Image (spheres, rainbow, N blue to C red):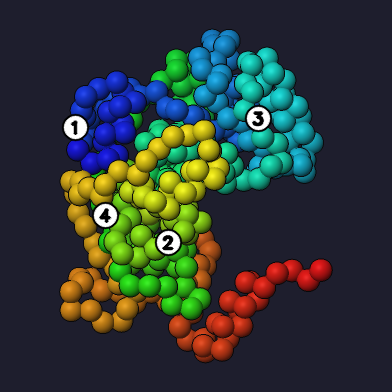
Amino acid sequence: MHAISKIIARHANRPSVEVGEIVNVTPDYVMLNDRGAARAADLLRKMGGERVFYPERIVVVFDHHYPPIRQQDSVSQKRTREWVKEQGISKFHAGEGIGHVIFPEKGYAFPGALIFGTDSHTVTNSALGCVATGMGHSDIASYLALGYNWLRVPEVIRFNLHGHFRPGVYAKDIALRIAQLYGEDAAPYLGVEFAGPLVKTMQMSERLVLCNMVIDFGAKTGYIQPDEITARFMSERAPGFSWTPPPPIRTPIAAALSISMFRRSSRLSPCRMICPMCAAPASSQTCASMRPFSAPVLAAVSRTFASPPPS
């Protein structure tokens, strides 16, 4: 089994699962953002539910519309605060940052975890070596009532990344290039694993960006094999979480694609040169290389964003 299948099997209390099989799973944590919490709570009531099954596993984050900019947002957040208190939910973060950043920073995401969220970019957390996926409000409401929900065990495609970052090139450019090359439906309901020499050198910030984008080509979850960089990140954010990186393993996948950061390579197919990319509305597939810009212009842009704000 691939690591993604193993994680699903463990949370289904099963020794093993098969690709394509539908199983009931209990996640470690579920993220409800400001709008998602209000809608899921309302649907829970309409389903006849009164109490959430696992209040200790629910994390409520106000990030999309906080502070509220409209009257209806203010009313909704007030009701959500009352609901959080009524349900005994202690993990509540209002105005502390974006939920997809709070989860890894607070230790809610960790290697081997299963995470649901009311936002498609919940997949960001999979950079830590876990299964993380967004769900609709009715699915989340069902989880709130029952304490579990279903998943289909996905096939997995692996992108092996080679080379090194050129000046002005970052993880976001790799993801945009993949979307441009293979389309927004490149990985429908698939697990997407990133591996290869380049990934091993990436810091967690770049890995999070890479996995954040897998939903933009249809993936169910991302995945990066946990390693020493993951262990160091976890020790700094969640020192009470004891975890040792496992030895590297090769796990079965449906397909593998190698992408090179260099122009030519006799070993890789297909070999693609990654340049700084610029996404255009309204599709991640509609993006263009910034190669026509001169190197001094790109260097100036890089310096601008890298420089600290004036005091």
What residue do we see at 62% from left, 78% from top?
A: 303
Label 2: few (<14), some or many (≥20) within 10 Å?
some
- Determine whether label 4 and label 2 are within 8 Å by CB: no
Dot 3 crowding, Cα within 10 Å, few <14, some 14–19, many 20+: some
Q: Which disc number belongs to residue 92?
A: 3
Q: Note whether 10 is above or below 54 in the view shown.
A: below
The mark nearer the N terminus, 4 or 2, is 4
* Placement of 284 over or under 43, stated as above or below: below
The residue wearing badge 1 is 18
Q: What amino acid type is highlighted by mark number 3? A: Phe
Circle 4 or circle 2, nearest the eye? 2
Mark 4 neighbour density, 10 Å: few (under 14) some (14–19) many (20 or more): many
Which amino acid type is marked by label 2? Met
The reply to whether the C-beta atoms of the residues labelled 4 and 3 are less than 8 Å apart is no
Depth check: 220 or 228 in front?
228
3D distance between C-alphas at marks 2 and 3: 31 Å
N-term-proximal mark, 2 vs 1: 1
Amino acid type indicated by mark 1: Glu
**Residue under numbered circle 4:** 158
- Mark 4–mark 3 Cα distance, whole angstroms, equals 35 Å
Quarter residue 264 falls in? bottom left
Return the x and y of residue 301 as percentages of the image width and height. Answer: 60, 78
Q: Alpha-carbon distance for marks 2 and 1?
A: 31 Å
Marks 2 and 3, the one that precedes in the sequence: 3
Q: Is residue 306 left or right of residue 211?
A: right
* 69, above or below 12, in the image: below
In the picture of the structure, the residue carrying the numbered disc 2 is 202
SS at mark 1? loop
Amino acid type shown at disc 4: Arg
Count of marks placed on residues:
4
* 2 or 3: mark nearer the eye: 2
